[in-house]
Image: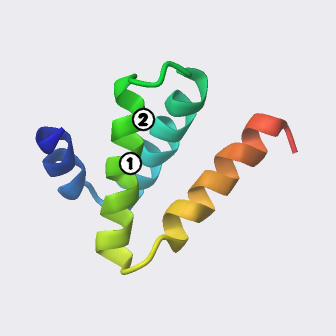
Amino acid sequence: MEGYAEEISSMSETELVVETKDKIWESVFWSAQFHESHDQVSACYREWVKRDGNSHTYNTLHTEVRLEFSGK
């Protein structure tokens, strides 16, 4: 997982937005508890907290994905 954390730390904000939303989607659809997307979405969360000092951006992206998923 360290390699993935390094990979996302070098992403631009735009790239990290796309990556985070993709991992949130994968985490939703791959309900298997130990699927790698769960760890990757956690890494995305930690990267946003590191960059922003809080989880606001991650929470916003999570809400966007949830709204897209629900069709609203």
Find the distance from the CA under tag 2 to the CA under tag 1: 6 Å
Task: Determine which quarter of the picture holds residue 11.
Answer: bottom left
Tell me the quadrant of the picture where the N terminus can be found: top left
SS of the residue under disc 2:
helix
In the image, residue 49 sits, relative to residue 47, either above or below, namely below
Of 42 and 71, nearer the camera is 42
The colour mode here is rainbow
| Residue 61 image position (x, y, % from top left) | 58, 56
Kindly identify the residue that appears in the image at 48 percent across and 70 percent down. 55
SS of the residue under disc 1:
helix
Amino acid at circle 1: Ser
Q: Tag 1: Cα neighbours inside 10 Å, few (<14), some, or many (≥20)?
A: some
Circle 1 residue: 42
Kindly identify the residue that appears in the image at 59 percent across and 31 percent down. 28
Of 13 and 31, nearer the camera is 31
In the image, residue 67 sits, relative to residue 25, either above or below, namely below
Mark 2 in CB contact with mark 1 (< 8 angstroms): yes
| Residue 5 image position (x, y, % from top left) | 20, 48
- Residue extending furthest toward the bottom: 53
Tell me the quadrant of the picture where the C terminus can be found: top right
Q: Tag 2: Cα neighbours inside 10 Å, few (<14), some, or many (≥20)?
A: some
Task: Determine which quarter of the picture holds residue 23.
Answer: top left
| Residue 51 image position (x, y, % from top left) | 31, 73
Kindly identify the residue that appears in the image at 85 percent across and 37 percent down. 71
Circle 2 residue: 38
Number of disc labels: 2
In the image, residue 3 sits, relative to residue 17, either above or below, namely above
Q: Is residue 15 left or right of residue 22?
A: left
Amino acid at circle 2: His
Q: Is residue 49 left or right of residue 72?
A: left
| Residue 31 image position (x, y, % from top left) | 56, 22
Kindly identify the residue that appears in the image at 40 percent across and 31 percent down. 37
